Image (tube, helix red, strand yellow):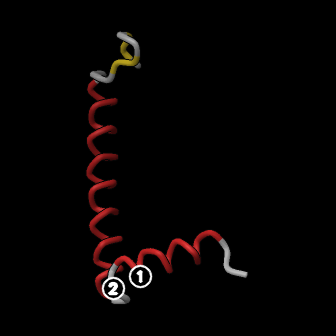
Amino acid sequence: MANRLDWQIEQIVAESDGSLHDALRALMQVNERLEAELEWLRSTLVSGHVCVDGQSLH
């Protein structure tokens, strides 16, 4: 029986019309966006501009 990750891989490939190349491209694009968001969050935290419920996190 396939585990959760195997099932997710099958779903991504199916959504890419069976193309492993297109599935990998889609995953890499998502990864790039997540890395950019993480970098933005890191830089925002360093500068002390993130607020939660009106309070700064620093």
Helix or strand or loop: what does disc 1 sit on? helix
* Residue 10 point in image, percent of width and height: 50, 80
Which residue corresponds to mark 2?
17
Q: Quadrant of the N terminus?
A: bottom right
Label 1 packing within 10 angstroms: few (<14), some (14-19), many (20+)? some
Task: Identify residue type, mark 1.
Answer: Val
Find the distance from the CA under tag 1 to the CA under tag 2.
Answer: 7 Å
Closer to us: 57 or 12: 12
Query: Which circle marks residue 2 in the picture?
Result: none
At 26% from the left and 41% from the top, the residue drawn is 40
Query: Which circle marks residue 13 in the picture?
Result: 1
Q: Quadrant of residue 33?
A: bottom left
Residue found at the far top of this picture: 54
Q: Is residue 7 above or below residue 32?
A: below
Q: Is residue 21 above or below residue 45?
A: below
Horizontal side of 11 relative to 18 (left or right) equals: right
Label 2 packing within 10 angstroms: few (<14), some (14-19), many (20+)? few
* Residue 37 point in image, percent of width and height: 29, 46
At 28% from the left and 77% from the top, the residue drawn is 25
Task: Identify residue type, mark 2.
Answer: Asp
Q: Nearer the viewer, mark 1 or mark 2?
A: 2
Asked if the residue under mark 2 is in contact with the one under mark 1, i.e. CB atoms within 8 Å, the reply is no
At 28% from the left and 31% from the top, the residue drawn is 44
Helix or strand or loop: what does disc 2 sit on? loop
* Residue 30 point in image, percent of width and height: 32, 62
Q: Is residue 12 above or below residue 45?
A: below
Q: Quadrant of residue 41?
A: top left
Q: Quadrant of residue 19?
A: bottom left
At 41% from the left and 19% from the top, the residue drawn is 57
Residue found at the far right of this picture: 1
Horizontal side of 52 relative to 37 (left or right) equals: right
